[in-house]
Image: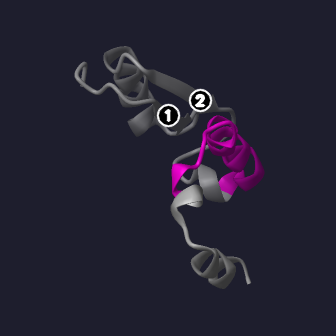
């Protein structure tokens, strides 16, 4: 895992005992990893706490450039956006 060189987000719930320790170990093993441990959450974080999950996942993506957006033709963009 030390060879993974892309930003990596590891999300686990503090009540998800089977995945909590592996998540911590992954964070320690991947140089560019971030770890989010959600309180009072189990394994189905996206279902249990959807707003907080979306915020955690969305925040790092919000500042990213979208190179694919410029590559789309107007007709493709229009058909996607309505």
- For the point 60% across and 42% down, the residue is 65
Q: Which x, y percent locates residue 3?
A: 22, 22
Quarter of the N terminus within the rendering: top left
Q: Quadrant of residue 39?
A: top right
| Label 1 crowd bin: few (<14), some (14–19), many (20+), radius 10 Å | some
Q: SS class of the residue under badge 1? A: strand
Q: Which x, y percent locates residue 74?
A: 64, 75
Is label 2 in contact with label 1 (beta carbons under 8 Å)? no
Select label 2 or label 1 by which is in front. 1
Q: Which residue is mark 1?
A: 9
28 shown above or below 76: above
Q: Which x, y percent locates residue 36?
A: 58, 29
Q: Which residues are magenta?
A: 48-68
| Label 2 crowd bin: few (<14), some (14–19), many (20+), radius 10 Å | some
Q: Quadrant of residue 27?
A: top left
Q: Which residue is mark 2?
A: 37
Q: Is residue 59 magenta?
A: yes
- For the point 58% across and 32% down, the residue is 14
Quarter of the C terminus within the rendering: bottom right
Q: Nearer the viewer, residue 42 or 5?
A: 5
53 shown above or below 24: below
Q: Nearer the viewer, residue 37 or 4?
A: 4
Q: Which SS type dominates the magenta stretch? A: helix
33 shown above or below 67: above
74 shown above or below 67: below
Question: Which tag, 2 or 1, sits closer to the chain's start?
Answer: 1
Q: CA distance from mark 2 to mark 1?
A: 11 Å
Q: Is residue 61 magenta?
A: yes
Q: Which mark is residue 38?
A: none
Q: Which x, y percent locates residue 19?
A: 41, 37
- For the point 69% across and 38% down, the residue is 59
Left or right, residue 34 beside residue 64: left
């Amino acid at each position: 895992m030390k060879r993974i060189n892309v930003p990596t987000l590891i999300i686990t719930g503090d009540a998800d005992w089977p995945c909590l320790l592996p998540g911590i170990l992954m964070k320690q093993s991947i140089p560019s990893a971030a770890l989010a441990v959600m309180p009072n959450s189990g394994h189905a974080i996206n279902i249990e706490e959807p707003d907080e999950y979306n915020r955690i996942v969305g925040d790092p993506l919000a500042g990213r450039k979208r190179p694919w957006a410029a590559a789309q033709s107007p007709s493709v963009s229009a058909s996607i956006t309505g």
